[in-house]
Image (cartoon, helix red, strand yellow):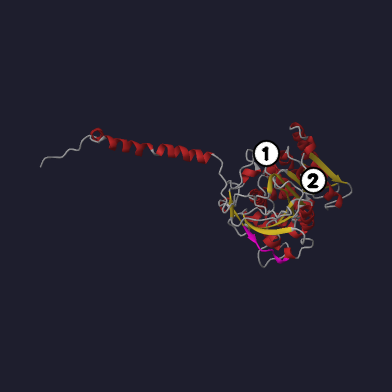
Amino acid sequence: QKEIIPPPPCSRWTSLSLPELIGMACIIALPLPLRFCISKRKKGAVEPTIKNKSTSRNISSQPSGNKTITSKKETVFPSPQKSLHPPPCHPTSLGSFFRSSSDPLASKRTLPCTSTLLPLSNAVSSLPGKQHLDVIEVMLRTEESDMGSMRVLLAANPSPDSDGDKGLPVVICLHSLGSNRMEVWPRVRDMARRGYLAIAVESRYHGDRTPRGMHGMEAYKRALVQAWKNGATQPFLFDTLWDLRCLVDYLLSRDDVDPARIGITGISMGGMLAWLAAASDPRIAVSVPVIGVQNFKWAMQNDKFQGRVDSIPWVFEAAAKDLNRTQVDSEVVEKVWYRICPWLLPAFDAPFSLPLIAPRPLLVINGELDNRCPMEGLTEPMETTRQEYSRMKSGDNFKFYIEKGVGHQITERMEKEADKWFDRFLLNPK
């Protein structure tokens, strides 16, 4: 039989008709614009995806002009963007720490956060003074872990004096160590009456976020010790900071919120969170940390760490035992901070992170005799922060208020100072 020799590759093209050649050219060229579009989409910002979002504002206006808080069910919103202000001593900012290789829960934080409207709990239903306010509760799902659910309490005056076209100013109120969101209810109630959308949430392992069968500080104690031993979580500050970033995402998805007027305040541990949340998230416009700002590294280097150690002694005692030490010394303290709060000492401590809040309004409130936030250690961070505000020509936006003769406690005068600061920059901004 005669051997069949296939034609050379080039001759196959010459045997095709004109329509066939045009079709082949389209098939070959099609992936090029697709690849270009995909690469452009990856480089651009992710557009928010909100289920069941109505085209009208999310405020129920009654004939009298009253405003009622409403909530979207199953709202899905994008993950928070990275912070724009990296600390001077490390290329990674606190905002970009989350979901990075340094974040032990990065794999749990890949899905979008969701929110669900809840019926009021018995505790909230019986709160004093809520009868004349709009009060709702929302469950925020921040990550795929046992601690990834957070109840959010929102309260507002049905007849606020603010401009309805701009939405309401917001103040997030954070509780102290070992407490829960009911501790800050008086502040939430009072701020709601004055025209704010006031928010109360709980830190991980506190209040409603305590695992079943555990009481008091038992869950938080165990979480801290486990963080020291295996580094699987960061319950002291960073894990709740992630929740707060998701909370801001949720607030920005609401139609009754003014995105330019979101403030945050907290007491003690809540004060630390208020300071670091504002430093890591530029969407927070005003911050008022109360008896929370401190210089961790200065306290360690000057043997002034005992006050802070005494607030969470279990993790330091466990570390001393594992390190074969008879007592907690500065070396033990240093190792604990590096373990349970990576980069806190070299990159996110007060001297580095407080200036990142500039030029946004910042009021730091501390007691003169507070052994957990020693005044001597605040000299450096306050000076670097003043210099940054001055450099940005916003010196009036920063204030350091010291309550004379007061230790680690909050006073009525401190609350009044905080109220004036929020009213100046959020309720009645110029």
379 relative position to 203: left or right: right
Q: Which residue is mark 2?
A: 423
Looking at the image, which residue sits at the far bottom?
A: 213
Q: Is residue 69 above or below residue 22?
A: below
Question: Which quadrant of the figure contains the N terminus?
Answer: top left
For residue 141: magenta? Answer: no
Q: Position of residue 103 (x, y in %)?
A: 60, 49
Q: Amino acid at mark 2?
A: Asp
Q: Amino acid at mark 1?
A: Pro
Front residue of 193 and 174: 193
Magenta-highlighted residues? 116-122
8 relative position to 74: left or right: left
Q: In the drawing, what numbered circle is on residue 87?
A: 1
Cα distance in 3D space between marks 1 and 2: 30 Å
Q: Secondary structure at mark 1?
A: loop
Mark 1 or mark 2: whose residue is earlier in sequence? 1
In front: label 1 or label 2: 2
Q: Position of residue 127 (x, y in %)?
A: 76, 63
Q: Is residue 224 above or below residue 421?
A: below
